[in-house]
Image (tube, coloured by chain):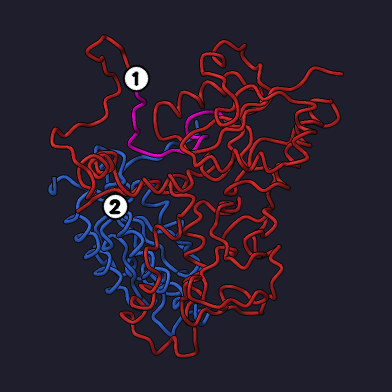
Amino acid sequence: MPEKIKIALGQGATCSGCDIAVLDLDVELLKLFEVADLTFAPLAADIKYKDVEAMGDGEITISLYHGAVRNSENEHIAKLLRKKSQIMVAYGACAAFGGIPGLANVTTRSKILDTVYEQTATTVNPEHIRPQTHYVSAEGHELELPELFEDVKALDDVVDVDYIIGACPPTRDMNVKLLGIVLDFVQGKAELPPKGIILASERTLCDECPRQKPDKVFIDEIRSVDYTELDPNKCFLEQGILCFGPATRGGCGAKCINVNMPCRGCMGPTAAVLDHGGSMLSAFTSILKVSSAETEIPEEEIEKLMAKLRDPLGTLYRFTLPKSLLKRVVKEV
Amino acid sequence: MKDTFKPKIIVFCCNWCAYAGGDLAGISRYQIKPYFRVIRTLCSARVDPEWIMEAFKLGADGVMVAGCHPGDCHYIGGNYRTRRRIALLRSLLRQFGLNPQRLELAWISAGEAEKFATTINSFINRITELGPSPYRKSTVDTQAAGVSKEVVDA
């Protein structure tokens, strides 16, 4: 019996759904623990940072870091795991592209703190207390809190990342494949794949979508998923539902589509584009209410038509704002 | 600031109308301020929204997309796509915190040399008024287009 490999599950700014996604391996978990030890996983095992700090460099075989990097503690874990691991994986949409926490880049650190510590209706804070990174209590206890960063970052903005796995969270099939890749490498059966995005298709989700594909898709009216009875066989866009399939990388097995929900883009953009939102913007504007009367519509009407997409930034960059070209919102006026 | 600020402006011109119009403006010796750089594309609809965002990311103070007049597109309907994208992109850029006036859409035919000159000049004036883009990394580099010498391989 060869020595077991070591796995770490690092947490950044995360909802921990990715931890649960690993547990979703169910019976495969038994296979996993036959060959692997969980050396660090705050959600599942009581192992402290100092235990990881005491490990040798490269001692951990593979680290799955999930969550974005938005405070000094996240950054510390990211750098620590990078140092101690042979393979570093940005696991899930937040680590890969910033994800939902990345939407904090629409505002600033000080505005976030203002909201949380002053402005919400239930906040009572007459002394205007704000979190301090260092505090010494009257009894002399020293306490440290991580510092919140101005920008939310993806993992590869902070450390060198070997593999990027999108999806929110990565599916069971992806995890099984990942396990296979690691096992083959450890047992010397196969080389590791080249660095970069793995376990994903090079094509868009539309390519693997099981629904009927019309020759030309048009949206006649934007509808909300909540109030529309959806035909499970028809293209979402045709039914007026904004589906990110045309701009999003496939490889997730069209899980949402199969349960009658549109794609929201958690697999990120394909390698052919620089900006997920820009890619979807092109697709969306080209199919909204296109008719033979296009030449008759004055420019103001076009603007009104395009305004039907509410909150373009939040919709188009739901998972990828920190990895978009402009990265964050600035304030000019 | 306004006296010394020399904006950087990217102008995407379609091959068939706006670029030819620009050509004619040059031949006709219309005076245009030297703060713009032209990128020729086959059609204004070839201008991917991400190129415009990349231009802003790289420090452009303004971006103009110029194509054929509606109905005159060499590819029949390309410019109708362009105006849709620009319309949504403007509201997106507004959300990103940029003044949407930094993105301009213009229709210039191959014969409209004067319109080319006046459109570019007034856009340059507008951007000069607005000042440097907040996405500019530094405002120190205010050299005008074409003034810096290109690096020549030894």
Residue at x 59% of width, y 78% of height: A217
Q: Residue at x 58, y 41 (%)?
A: A18
User: CA gap, disc 1 to disc 2?
Assistant: 42 Å
Is residue A155 found inside the magenta-colored segment of the image? yes
- Colour assigned to chain A in the rendering is red
Q: Which mark is residue B56?
A: none
The crowd level at tag 2 (other Cα within 10 Å; few <14, some 14-19, many 20+) is many
In the image, residue A275 lies at what x, y percent?
49, 53
Image disc number at residue B61: 2
Q: Nearer the viewer, residue A238 or A25?
A: A25
Q: Chain of mark 1?
A: A
Report if residue B23 is visible in the image.
Answer: no
Residue A33, horizontal then vertical, whole percent = 75, 28
Give the amino acid type for the residue marked by disc 1 in the picture: Glu
Q: Is residue A107 above or below residue B64?
A: above
Q: Is residue A226 visible?
A: yes
Between A288 and A133, the one lying in front of the other is A133
* In this view, B137 is above or below A76: below
The residue that appears at 48% across and 49% down in the rendered structure is A320
Residue A76 coordinates in the image, percent (x, y): 46, 23
Chain where mark 2 sits? B
- Please, what is the three-letter code of the amino acid marked with disc 2? Asp
Residue B138's quadrant in the figure?
top left
Instruction: Single out the mark in the foreground, 1 or 2.
Output: 1
Please tell me whether mark 1 sits on a helix, a strand or a loop: strand
- Disc sitting over residue A144 in the figure: 1
- Chain identifier, colour blue: B
Q: Nearer the viewer, residue A181 or A201?
A: A181
Q: Position of residue B7 (x, y in %)?
A: 25, 51
**Residue range of the region highlighted in magenta in the rendering:** A144-160
Element assignment for label 2: loop
